Amino acid sequence: MRLTRRGLLAAGALAPIGFSAVARAAQPDLSALQPITGDAVPIGREERSARLARAQALMKANGIGAVLIEPGASLLYFTGVRWGRSERLTAAVIPVEGDPIIVTPFFEEPSVRESLGIPAEIRVWQEHEDPFAVVAGFLRDKKLLGRPLGIEETARFFAVDGMWRALAGVKIVSANPVVRGCRMFKTPAEIALMQKAADVTLAAYRWTYPRIEAGMTPADIAALMSAATVKLGGQVAFNLILLGEASAYPHGTGKPQRVVKGEVVLMDCGARVHGYESDISRTFVHGEATAEQRKVWDHVRAGQQRAFAAAQLGTPAGRVDDAVRGWYATLGYGPDYKLPGLSHRTGHGIGMDGHEPINLVRGEMTKLAPGMCFSNEPGLYLPGKFGVRLEDCFHMTEAGPKWFSVPPRSIEEPIG
């Protein structure tokens, strides 16, 4: 919907200076920006072949005969097929040996084939037919009917129920040991795309930050970030903008918000490059920060550094959260998730999905290993006042953690 001066004034929402800010947000001058993703290399056939080999090795190790995957990031990860979910089953079935199949409605086969990035047979079903019978037929052909069938964790119940109906007595198990065993550990090609996505988001922040003006709404600021992200060569994954008191609630509030001098601006934004995401948060004050705002900001920055220092190879992931939360308690926050304090986990896994297993959360005993990627975002939230979240992602290397984006040093230089 296009913004017009008549519509804005009719709403009684803006003074002339406010309209000027919104107009600049709606039609920003992007001439200073150039695409930076031209050298990004998408995932190719060779990489996907290695993924399938890894998956099949894990299936053998875990006694799984085949894995069923519905549309989503995991389908794209293994097959290259970009598809949406509907009441009609489209799915990949990866056997413990040999090539996978894609099961899809007959009339969708040409479209599905367009993005197929691996050697795979496409088996179709007609509108009056049972797609799960097609899956069962493939398993019968591969002599896998007596072996457990793994289901990818985001699959809908109708897929599980359909397999139960099509194969009486089939043992259905979680495919997590296979799918997580592949997707949790990023290869250099994946790390490179995540780095590029982070570069795009940070560059968009640097362009947007000096253009934020009093009177702007979250939508105005998000429009600037979105425009910059696209011009820089990325896709917009998300833009969450929290202003003033709304920043005290990690995912915001439905109340109207505008940039006000002396109040907090919290931005949580991400881009996507060839299917891989970034997730970076920045918090600053529009105008001069108060002593309390500066103190909390400094505590969050120190919390980020403690989390990073705790993220060492072989350390259980939950210990990273413990390190931050325990230190915050010594400063008078919390304890635990109590507010004012840190009301959410310290970080989450990231890759093709903005949130992926595993998390930096209490009790998570999975040990950190090379290739794992996480957000680091130990925010502090003061209900009724404001919140501060600084978020940068890192990946585990053979030498320990490495930042995708380096955290800012001070509230006076909040972007980095």
Image: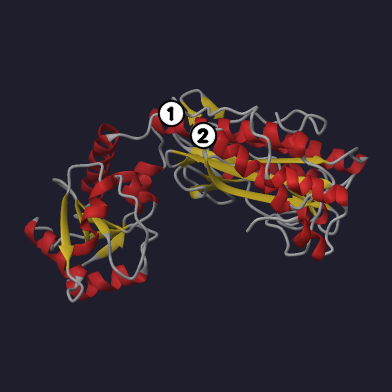
Residue drawn 77% across the image and 60% down it: 6
Where, quadrant-wise, is the C terminus in this rendering?
A: top right
Dot 1 falls on a residue whose secondary structure is: loop
**Above or below, comparing residue 296 to residue 245 in the picture:** above
At label 1, which amino acid type do we have? Answer: Ala
Task: Judge by depth and name the residue closer to the eye, 17 or 118.
Answer: 17
Rendering quarter of residue 77: top left
Report the disc number at residue 233.
2
Element under disc 2:
loop
Q: Which residue shows up at 26% across the image and 42% down it? A: 117
Q: Identify the residue shown where x is 81% and y is 34%.
A: 411
From mark 1 to mark 2, how far is it between C-alphas? 10 Å
Q: Are marks 1 and 2 in contact (CB under 8 Å)?
A: yes
Residue 102: mark in rendering? none
x and y percentages locating residue 104 in the rendered image: 23, 61
Expressed as whole percent of the image width and height from the top left, the position of residue 288 reads: 91, 37
Nearer the N terminus, badge 1 or badge 2? 1
Q: Amino acid at mark 2?
A: Gly
